Every structure is written in structure tokens, then in C-alpha cells.
Amino acid sequence: MTDLPIDPSSTIPKKAIVSGHDSGQAGIGAFLAMSRRAIVGFYRQPSNWVVGAAFPLLITAVSASAFSRSTSLPGFPDADSFLQFLMAGTILQGTLFGSITASTDLALDIENGFMDRLLASPVSRVSILVSRLAGAATFGAGITVLYIAVFTLFGAKVNGGLAGMLVMVLLSTIMAIGVGGYGAAIGLKTGSAEAVGNSFPLIFILLFMSSAFFPVETMSGTYKTIAQYNPISLVIDASRHQVLQGFDLGEATKGFVIAIAFASIMIGLALSQLRSRLADAS
Amino acid sequence: MSASTPTRTTNVQQTALGPELHVRVGPVARALVRRSLVAITRVPSALVPILLMPVFFMIAFTGSYSAITNIPGFPTDNIFNWFVPYACVQGAAFAGIGTGFSTARDIETGFYDRLLLAPSSRASLILGPVGTSIVRSSFPFLTVLPLGLLLGADFPGVLGLLILAFTSATVSIMSGLWALGVVFRMQTQRSLGLVQVGIFATLFLSIGQVPLAVMRGWLHGAARVNPTTNLLRMARQGFLGGVTWELTWPGLVAAILVVSGLGLFAVSGFRKMEK
């Protein structure tokens, strides 16, 4: 690191450049610039997010018609329609699908050598990682707003009103960051965008073995136990409560605790992979 | 060996068109099937979509939707009887996608150009991949079915099993021809996204998840005219009561019509690619 050519006109302290840590205004500026790059790069390629946004809606359209009579089953939560029941699950599904795609960009940065240039620059290592998750976070928030609008258009409303919707947007954003962190950890471990893509089935399995598509109350046996304690179920149930019953701070808090814990673990995992990568490189 | 001196041992026949030589369809198609199966043993991850995905879907669907058998009009009270045949058919459809992937890869790497330059029958270049689809469709059949029976599905009888095996093979031919038709036209692995969307849409817009009697709204109309509905009725009948001609002949008609249509689609795509 000490051999790096330092631009005498740079406003960043020499000490920061050598240690790889920036501080203050320059650090925030670099973080914002990298976040902007991540967001623009993600949305510039519609193939990144169009399928992730459209596919869950297609599944929902089919399921809402196929399982519409299920709302009368014993144990089924009190919902106006199956479409209304599906809203929270569909939102999280869209969030997870898009976020894993967004996290492949970090692996692409490694593949094309851009990551090496970032690591050679006087930018905080945490900023490099966290800014990369900005694309996933904005996707999580954006897809939630879009889906709420689409569901409302088809007659499914959020009984929790604006406060309930805000809870849903925040939960999706945090989960998007968590899944982005999971993808980033794999990307940093393998340095391969393909490996990040191939890790998608695990997310898919977690989603299916949850309350996303059908209520846990109607399930039975081992499957019910797995779905009940699946963290994805706990976040979906918190979000679903805002849709079906109305705004409830207690339920929202439960969801936030799970989502923040999930995101923290995943970001911690990604940071640990980043440290390992740096140690291997030095 | 010179191409201009065909002998009996080379299995090559001279055509009436002149110096052009054609190896018979069968040996080339079989060689392509064998090559594709060897490729599977070398890339085990290729088995994931055709082995693990149908097993996972069977477990996920039977676990998530176990209560739907209580809806009035549902034809069985055992959810495994409903989803096990569906998972077999689904796995067969994924087998066709795998065939499309390997053909697209061969086109991208230039191997397909060598096949086109070889003195082989053009028909074998379609029949080979389709044969591969059929062989691959046996993998999910041989994994999902025993597991499903173990988990609680009723034994459908020998005739029911044969009909399910026949339907799986037919669906793998359909998805293989669909994949080839798209891949021949677009000549890239990226085109497989379109192939997957087509197959998923066909399966979703059918009686895959619930019977017509339980559906409401637009899906009912779509599933009623979707030929996959007749194929699934044919595949499931052994599990839902017994094999009858009333449930078999619409499936056979659907199979003949769809295979013919997709066959034409694949052949016309092949001709376009040759030009």
C-alpha cells in the first residue's frame, strides 16, 4: 500500500490513503459516489430487475386464481381475498429475487478487476461493501411501493394505511440488504458472479418453506414446524399483519428485530469474507 | 479414411444427390444421446434441475398446500396423489430445458458447425437431442416417484405407472422440441430464459396446482384450453382412482398435436439456422 502513487493535489490525508481508511467529508463523498454507481449500474440493465419484478407478479396472478377458494379453509387468516393474503409474500419474493441479482454486481467487480482498483484507493473497506448493497436496498424499497400499487389496483388493500405501508417498505429494504450481503459474501468468497447466481436456490428453498404462499396454520407435521421457525416466515407475518389486521407496532418490531438480525449476520459474513480476501491478497 | 470411398463398415450411404454422404439417422442420434449423457456425468450440477428441483417442488407443494384437499371438489384427500405425478411431469419438462442448454452451448462453442459439416443425416441432429430429453426425463421419474410413494402416495397400478412414464417422456419431447426451436433461431444460451418462461407458463396455466373444479376467474379459462391440462389428467389418473379411456384419449390427442406442432417449429428453426 505504501508504494501507491499519491496525488499531491488530493484532499484526502496521506495517512488515510496508506491505511485504506478515509474519514470525514471525503469518506462520505466516496461512499455516496460508489452507492450512486451501484444504483445506476443496477437499473441501467433492465435484465437485472425486470424478470425479478415481473415473475412474482405472474406467480401471484396464477395463485390468486387457483387458490381463491382456500380462504374458507379452517385456520386460514381473516383476509378479504387470497390476493390480499399473498401481498406480503409476493413483496418479499420480489425483494429476494432482485437483491440476489444486485449482489452479483460485486462479484462482477471482482471478475473485471474493478475491485482491485477500489482496494488500492483510499476508501474505507466497509464503504466498498455497504455502498454495493445500495442497489439492492433501493430495489427492495422500490419493488414494495410498486407491488402495493399493483395489488391496490386489483382490489387488495393494506389495512394498516400509510404507517403499515411504511413498515412494509422498511422491512423489504432491510431484507434486501441482508440478501445482498449474503450474495456479496459468496461473491467475495468465490470471486464469481456465476457462483452468486447459483446460490439462489437456497433463497428459493427458504422462501418456499415459509408462510409466503400459504398460511402456516393450515400446514401440518415437520413442514409446519420448519415454516413456523423460518426467519422469512417471521418477517412475512409481520408485514402481512399490517396488510390484513392493520398497523401494529408490536408486530412490526418483531419483524424489524428478525430482519435487522438477518441483515447484520449477512453483512458480518460479507465483511469477514472481504477481510479474508484482503489477507490472501497481501 | 477418404469420404469419397464409402464402404459397408463405415455405415455411410451415398445419396442419389451425388457426392453428398449421409450416415444413417439411428447411429448418429444414439451417439449424440450417449455424448450428452457422458456430459452429465462430467458436470453433475446439470442434474440439479432435473433431479433436485422436482423433488424439492414435490416436498414444497405437498407441505405448503396440504390443506387444499379439504376444498370441496378436490379429487383426492391425499395431497401426494395430486403432486407426485405433477412433479414427475415437471421434471420431464426441465429435462427438455437441459437439452436446449447443451445444444446452445454446442452452437456457441462451434461444435455444432462440425456436426453440420459431417456427412450425417440432418434428422439425427434433432432426434439425438430429443432422445436425450427422453432419457433425462427418466431421472426425475425414478427419483420423485419412489420418494413420493415412500412419503404416502398411493400405488397407481402398473398401467397407471406406464401411463405416467409415457406422459413424462412425451412432455420431455415437447419441451426438448420447444427448446431446440428457440435455440436454433437465437443460437445463444441466453435464449434459454425464453424457453424456461414458456415451459413455466405452460405448467402454471394448467391444472398443475388445483383441478378445474376448484379454480376461479381467468385461470379457469386458460387451463381449460391448455393441452397440458389433458396431459396432466392422463398422467394422474392412476393415482386418482383408475385408468380410463375417457381420461386417456384427450391426453393422447394433445400429445400428438403438440409434438407435431413443436416438431415443425424445431425443424423450421433448424432450416433457418442452416441458411
Image (cartoon, rainbow, N blue to C red):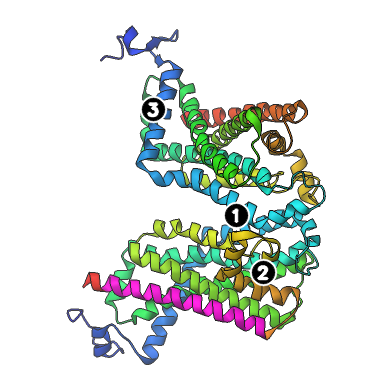
**Quarter-of-image position of residue B267:** top right
- Percent position (x, y) of residue A123? 33, 81
Residue A94 showing in the rendered view: no
Label whose residue precedes the other's in the sequence (3 or 1)? 1
Q: Residue at x 63, y 40 (%)?
A: B85
Range drawn in magenta: A250-278
- Kind of residue at disc 1: Ala
Chain letter of disc 1 in the image: B
Q: Is residue B191 above or below residue A13?
A: above
**Contact flag, marks 2 and 3 (Cβ < 8 Å):** no
Q: Is residue A45 above or below residue B270?
A: below
- Kind of residue at disc 2: Ala
Chain letter of disc 2 in the image: A
Q: Residue at x 60, y 65 (%)?
A: A225
Q: Secondary structure at mark 3?
A: helix
Q: Secondary structure at mark 1?
A: helix
Chain letter of disc 3 in the image: B
Q: Do marks 2 and 1 both belong to one polypeptide chain?
A: no
The answer to whether residue A32 is magenta is no
Residue under label 1: B60
Residue under label 2: A88
Q: CA distance from mark 3 to mark 1?
A: 42 Å
Q: Secondary structure at mark 2?
A: helix
Residue under label 3: B115
Residue B99 showing in the rendered view: yes
In which quadrant of the rendered image does the N terminus of chain B lie? Answer: top left
| Most common secondary structure along the magenta stretch | helix
Foreground: disc 3 or disc 1: 1
In the rendered structure, the answer to whether residue B73 lies left or right of residue B262 reads: right
Q: CA distance from mark 2 to mark 3?
A: 51 Å
